[in-house]
Amino acid sequence: MSDSSLRARLEALRKQLHEHSYRYYVLDEPIIPDVEYDRLFRELQDIEREHPEWRSDDSPTQRVGAEPLSSFSQVRHETPMLSLDNVFSEQELRDFDRRVRGRLDDGQAFHYACEPKLDGIAVSLLYVDGVLVRGATRGDGRVGEDITHNVRTVDSIPLKLQGEGWPVELEVRGEIYMPRQGFEALNMRAREEGSKTFVNPRNAAAGSLRQLDSRITASRPLEMCCYGVVASDDNLFSSHSGALAQLKRWGFLTSVELAVVDDIEACLAYYEQLLSRRDQLAYDIDGIVFKVDELALQEQLGFVSRAPRWAIAHKFPAQEEVTTLRDVEFQVGRTGAVTPVAKLEPVFVGGVTVSNATLHNLDEIERLGVKLGDTVIV
Ligand code: 9MJ
């Protein structure tokens, strides 16, 4: 094949692979079998191996990771990455709604966008001319760390945008997290290899992004769900939900749980509904985020210190709490099996008060190294 037709083939393969990966990871509607994807992928790898001068950072082959960096550099967020204020009760959520309505014109109609609050790592992605050029952690909201090399390995993050109409500069924000199934598999592998396991999916995601060697990140089952956008063109969107719908068309994974509702009663119903399905979700969530959907009204409401006045996180009851170990009792079962039981300072966690916890057996006590009076996590 001539160089020019080989080059054309390379471009075609990249385009196809980007599209198939979008269909697979974002739309969840693949149209080719995995083996066909792998065949196209290998063909592209072969051409790039033969022509290293044609390699490109936005090629689908770059998801496998690259040579380690020696350090992370810092990134300044032109538009600060905000944090959310939290509420923990229905009353506090109603207070939030009252404050919102108090700041808007009398009788002004508006909507709330409701979405799960993912328990992961907040990340910003920057696209210039539709190409991913930078990924950064939130850091303190103004300055974060450059993790471009690592975000490139996350399959659900587009290296190149799909569709059309994106602004020259597009910044997309969201949460990188590790789905539970991937987390369990990762820990299973760690146990088999005798290496350290992760405490929870959030720690695993954070540890995976903190790697200087992106080949390690590439081996971790990470996903990114996008929930915000900063565009160079101010008038591109009129609503938060509309912006998310557009993000999906451009190739980003957004939450399938997004709902737009009329009032705070519906927000409360959404909260109850998702709380009851919390354990069935494929990923950990620690609450619900409610946002005023109309962007013009968001602008009108503005910010207080570092949190927007137009959004709030309604946190679920904690599933982990800290308490102290008071005593250990030994229970003898009907079969004669002895089970050590931890007597704990009662603690409210996951919606119930916990004062006992099984320690399984003496090996487990030894493994944990627990001593009376220790601070423990339930
Ligand atoms: C999470 N963690 O899922 C926001 N978030 O919006 C969602 N976080 C957020 N939105 C503005 N769904 C600042 C943070």
Image (cartoon, rainbow, N blue to C red):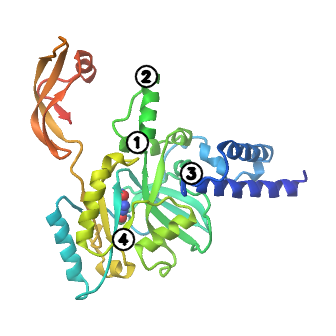
Q: Earlier in the sequence, mark 1 or mark 3?
A: 3
Cα separation, mark 4 vs mark 1, equals 27 Å
Could you tell me which quadrant the C terminus lies in? top left
Q: Earlier in the sequence, mark 4 or mark 1?
A: 1
Inspect the image, locate mark 2, and give the three-letter code of the amino acid beneath it. Answer: Gly
Tag in front: 3 or 4: 4
Residue 140 seen in render: no
Considering the numbered disc 2 on the image, is that residue within a helix, a strand or a loop? loop
Cα separation, mark 2 vs mark 1, equals 21 Å
Q: Above or below — where is 118 with respect to 325?
A: below
Residue 62 bears which disc, if any? none
Give percent across and percent down for residue 340: 17, 20
Cα separation, mark 4 vs mark 2, equals 47 Å
Determine crowd level at label 2: few under 14, some 14-19, many 20+ residues with C-alpha closer than 10 A. few
Residue plotted at (40% across, 42% down): 180
Per the image, the residue denoted by label 4 is 260
Query: Could you tell whether 198 is left or right of 8 in the image?
Result: left
Q: Are marks 4 and 1 in contact (CB under 8 Å)?
A: no
Per the image, the residue denoted by label 3 is 152
